[in-house]
Amino acid sequence: MSGTNNTSSNKINIPEARAALEQYKFEVANEIGVPLKKGYNGDLTSAQNGYVGGYMVKKMIEAQEKAMASKTQG
C-alpha cells in the first residue's frame, strides 16, 4: 500500500448534518469544560480533543439506545 489513503474517519456521511454536528461538538465541549473555540484549537491537548469526540459518541449512543428502547416499549 502507498502512504496515500483517501479514506477519512472524519467524513460526515450525511452532509446536511455538518452544521448540527459542529454545534453539538461545541455544546459537548462546553459541558465537559474544554475551551473549544471556532477556528484554531492547536492550543488544546490531544487528550482534550479526544475527550470531546469520545463524549460526543457516548451521548449519541445513549440517545440512540433511548430511541430504540422507546420504540420497543410503545
Image (spheres, rainbow, N blue to C red):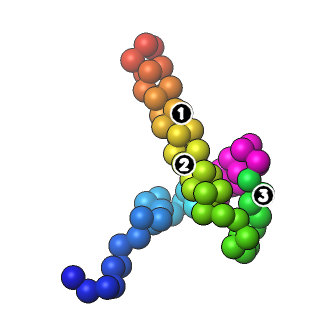
Instruction: Decide: is 35 above or below 69.
Output: below
Front residue of this view, candidates 11 and 74: 11
Residue assigned mark 3: 35
Q: Nearer the viewer, mark 3 or mark 1?
A: 3
Q: Is residue 47 left or right of residue 41?
A: left
Q: Nearer the viewer, mark 2 or mark 1?
A: 2
Q: Residue at x 43, y 13 (%)?
A: 73
Label count reads 3
Does dot 1 land on a helix, a strand or a loop?
helix
Residues at badges 3 and 2 in contact (C-beta under 8 Å)?
Answer: no
**Residue 61 visible in the picture:** yes
Does dot 3 land on a helix, a strand or a loop?
loop
Q: CA distance from mark 3 to mark 2?
A: 16 Å
Q: CA distance from mark 3 to mark 1?
A: 24 Å
Residue assigned mark 1: 63
Q: Which residues are magenta?
A: 19-33
Q: Position of residue 26 (x, y in %)?
A: 71, 54
Q: Position of residue 44 (x, y in %)?
A: 70, 65
Q: Is residue 38 left or right of residue 10?
A: right
Query: Residue 6 appears in which quarter of the rendering?
Result: bottom left
Residue assigned mark 2: 54
Q: Position of residue 60 (x, y in %)?
A: 53, 41
Amino acid type at mark 2: Gly
Query: Residue 48 appears in which quarter of the rendering?
Result: bottom right
Amino acid type at mark 1: Ala
Q: Residue at x 47, y 59 (%)?
A: 14
Label whose residue precedes the other's in the sequence (3 or 2): 3
